[in-house]
Image (spheres, rainbow, N blue to C red):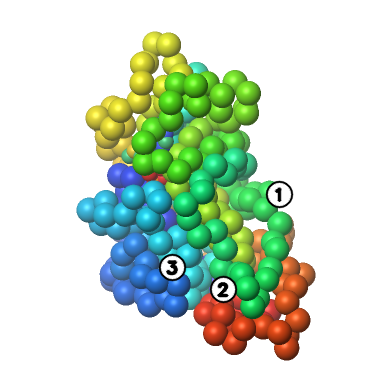
Amino acid sequence: MQTYIGIIGGSGLYEIDGLEGATWTTVDSPWGTPSDAILTGTLDGVKMAFLPRHGRGHVHSPSTVPYRANVDALKRLGVTDVISVSACGSFREEMAPGDFVIVDQFIDRTFAREKSFFGTGCVAHVSVAHPTCPRLGAACLTAGRDAGITVHETGTYLAMEGPQFSTLAESKMYRESWGCDVIGMTNMPEAKLAREAELCYASVAMITDYDSWHPDHGEVDVNEIIKTLMGNSEKAKGLVARLPKLLGADRAPCPHGCDRALDYAILTAPEKRDPALVAKLDAVAGRVL
Ligand SMILES: CSC[C@H]1O[C@H](OP(=O)(O)O)[C@H](O)[C@@H]1O
Ligand SMILES: Nc1ncnc2[nH]cnc12
């Protein structure tokens, strides 16, 4: 199988450079309109697709990002590996603004989003005990360090609904009681949907601020975030540019089973399945339906 890398760019990352044959491609999805057209092309002989999560010009708020359409559109294009790049606050002194973190766990506190492709008429339960792909995360770690970025190997991401930032009490609770390392508003349900779509998913957190807990930094504000974002997005481009060579064009099946997540997940008996829902699942679950 051929590798096809998909990048979902977060706040501050609305395009990537250097793709051969770069074209903004409109992808239709039965799950709605994706955040934007998708920039497709090749880099070092590997197919790549880039989707700005909030759309060019930052149109979608974290609650209204069309997560299902975005993941479906990438799967429909043929993407095999998704790297999410996101602006995040930090709960750790040593995870400083400008550093990157390879997120490997999440606590999902979002509540106003559609979280599954499945439902009445086709019920499925996938495991998200390990919500990110270790193989893809390791490639991101190497790519980031090769690009000269300070990258932390693991981290737990608190996904909040937003759009307001956390209260001081929440910030302290997430850090002190819940053991979270970073906070953002978008990686859930994105990671869960990627797993349902049998895509390897890695999350690169670009630290922009210390949220509100840090006694020497006061409370987070967008002005501070934007200043750090500019530098971070240039670093992210360096990381992304190194991925095709590291992953290679020929793709072995995921050793962690991300690309077979639906093998035993669907519970609804074939004769009881809703044909309309099954039709919408053609890209996400066509392999098993
Ligand atoms: C720019 S501040 C808050 C905003 O930034 C993050 O977006 P993304 O995860 O897409 O990089 C955060 O989650 C909020 O949506
Ligand atoms: N402190 C923070 N909280 C939530 N999302 C963020 N994105 C960047 N910084 C953030």
For the residue pair 232 and 172, the one nearer the viewer reads as 172
**Quadrant where the image shows the C terminus:** bottom right
- Mark 3 sits near ligand 1, with its Cβ under 8 Å away: no
Q: Position of residue 213 (x, y in %)?
A: 46, 19
Whether label 3 touches label 2, CB < 8 Å: no
* Alpha carbon distance from label 2 to label 1: 20 Å
Q: Position of residue 132 (x, y in %)?
A: 61, 50
Instruction: Indicate left or right for 271 with 20 as reference.
Output: right
* Alpha carbon distance from label 3 to label 2: 11 Å
**Residue type (three-letter) at the residue carrying disc 3:** Ala
The disc placed on residue 69 is 3
Image quadrant, ligand 2: top left
Residue at the far top: name it. 216
Disc on the earlier residue, 2 or 1: 1
Residue at 59% across, 36% down: 156
Residue neighbourhood size for the residue with mark 2, other residues' Cα within 10 Å, grouped as few (<14), some (14–19), many (≥20): many
For the residue pair 46 and 88, the one nearer the viewer reads as 88
What residue is shown with label 2? 284
What residue is shown with label 1? 129
* Alpha carbon distance from label 3 to label 1: 24 Å
Disc on the earlier residue, 3 or 1: 3
